[in-house]
Amino acid sequence: MNARSVPVELAASEIQEAFPRIYAACHLTHRRAGRHGGDLSQRESTILAHLSPDRPWDLSTLAGHLGVVSSTLSEALQPLVDAGLVRREPDPADRRRCHFTLTPLGVQARADSSVLNREILDDALESLSGQERALIAQSLRRLAETCRQARRRYDAGEEREESAS
């Protein structure tokens, strides 16, 4: 595989073009299979999509990100905790705060409710070499992380502009 250096603008443009095409090709319906064969609500699917097994979110940060108040999110998280999809752990530095992560069952429920149809995605990936699959997966993980960091910088910049006015 021949990787060439491309300018940021070209790479961003290619990603903006490819992402909707991947979504359109792999998206059939919003499947919400979830806890013990039950269905997940759209709200629960959204929460699971934002959580990770290894990157904890605290309640207020996640609530702010989702655009809801903490009490609303706390109420929405409780059934996911009760179903074993989400783990709630106290913050060791401040026992009044909690961190939330996905359990293995939550990871599976998130995959089952993904907007990308796994069968189509698996079929597409099978046509690539193992090396290409590894490169794509690694690159997407890296892009996701750098996008998360860029979003933090973007949000911090917006907050500075709002407080300056």
Image: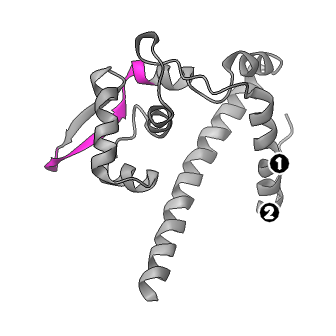
Q: Image quadrant for the N terminus?
A: top right
Query: Dot 1 corresponds to which residue?
Result: 17
Q: How crowded is mark 1: few (under 14 residues within 10 Å), some or many (20 or more)?
A: few
- Badge 2 or badge 1: first in the primary sequence: 2
Which numbered disc covers residue 134?
A: none
Magenta span covers which residues? 92-106
Task: Look at the numbered disc 2 and give the secondary structure of its residue.
Answer: helix
Quadrant for residue 61, please give it.
bottom left
> Residue 125's spot in the image, x, y percent?
76, 21
**How many C-alpha atoms fall within 10 Å of the one at disc 2: few (<14), some, or many (≥20)?**
few
As drawn, which residue projects farthest toward the left? 95
On residue 9, the disc is 2
Residue 84 on image: x %, y % = 32, 20
Up/down of 128 relative to 148, above or below:
above
> Can residue 92 be seen in the rendering of this structure?
yes
Answer above or below: position of 160 versus 56: below
93 up-or-down from 123: above or below: below
